[in-house]
């Protein structure tokens, strides 16, 4: 009987191959599930990468376009500020065409108009960072161009005696050197 019992027990117990096969199938199922999950995550990440890359390209193109527009229209504010100066000059020209005005009186009015227009023009230039090189400044070869040396008892050697043409600076950069005469 004990042998019969042993035989029955052995029949009820699965053999090693069956156990291994079940374990392999279980593991294969888990690996397949993990593989599917990882593939899904990979697909999601690829999609996310493609979207971010496309967004980056779009932003890059938009910024490039905005940069070129900014450069193209950079002088717009300056140009708008100069329009009133042009208007003033046109009014001065029309004033010279007035009939019946005394020539001395007309000349005085035109001179006054041109002086006011010049003041208006210089204000616009200063507003945009363009300033005249001061005539009272000491000689500086970076902003002055000495075109003549003169003897002057009132000035020290190397000092500016007179200015032939004003110089201008844009912020810290020289636009045009002032043409000056300096003392010997």
Image: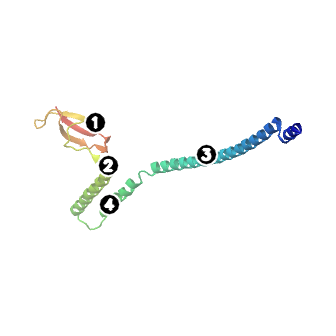
Residue 175 vs residue 22, the one in the foreground: 22
The crowd level at tag 4 (other Cα within 10 Å; few <14, some 14-19, many 20+) is: some
Q: Is residue 100 above or below residue 44?
A: below
Secondary element at image label 3: helix
- Residue at the image position 72 percent from the left and 41 percent from the top: 31
The numbered dot on residue 88 is 4
Give the alpha-carbon distance from disc 4 to disc 2, as whole Å: 22 Å
**Which dot marks residue 156?**
none
From the viewer's perspective, is the residue at label 4 or at label 2 nearer? Answer: 2
Nearer to us in this view, 110 or 11: 11
Looking at the picture, how far across and down is residue 105, in whole percent? Answer: 22, 63
Q: Identify the residue position indicated by label 2 in the image.
A: 129
Q: Nearer the viewer, mark 3 or mark 2?
A: 3
* Mark 4 vs mark 1, CA separation in Å: 34 Å
The answer to whether the residue labelled 3 contacts the one labelled 4, judged by CB atoms less than 8 Å apart, is: no
Which residue is nearer to you in this view: 152 or 109? 152
Residue 28 position in % (x across, y down):
76, 41
Quadrant location, the C terminus: top left
Q: As rendered, which of 161 and 50 lies closer to the eye?
A: 50
């Amino acid at each position: 009987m004990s042998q019969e019992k042993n035989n029955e027990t052995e029949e009820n117990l699965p053999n090693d191959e069956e156990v291994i096969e079940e374990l392999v199938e279980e593991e294969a199922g888990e690996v397949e599930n993990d593989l599917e999950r990882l593939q899904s995550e990979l697909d999601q990440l690829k999609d996310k990468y493609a979207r971010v890359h496309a967004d980056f390209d779009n932003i890059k193109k938009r910024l490039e376009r905005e940069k070129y527009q900014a450069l193209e229209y950079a002088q717009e504010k300056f140009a708008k500020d100069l329009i009133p100066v042009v208007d003033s000059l046109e009014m001065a020209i029309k004033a010279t065409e007035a009939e019946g005005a005394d020539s001395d009186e007309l000349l005085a009015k035109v001179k006054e108009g041109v002086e006011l227009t010049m003041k208006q023009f210089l204000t616009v230039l200063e507003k945009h960072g363009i300033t005249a090189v001061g005539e009272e400044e000491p000689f500086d070869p970076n902003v002055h161009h000495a075109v003549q040396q003169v003897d002057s008892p009132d000035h020290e050697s190397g000092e500016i005696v007179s200015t032939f043409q004003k110089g201008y600076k844009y912020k810290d950069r020289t636009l045009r050197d002032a043409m000056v005469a300096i003392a010997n």
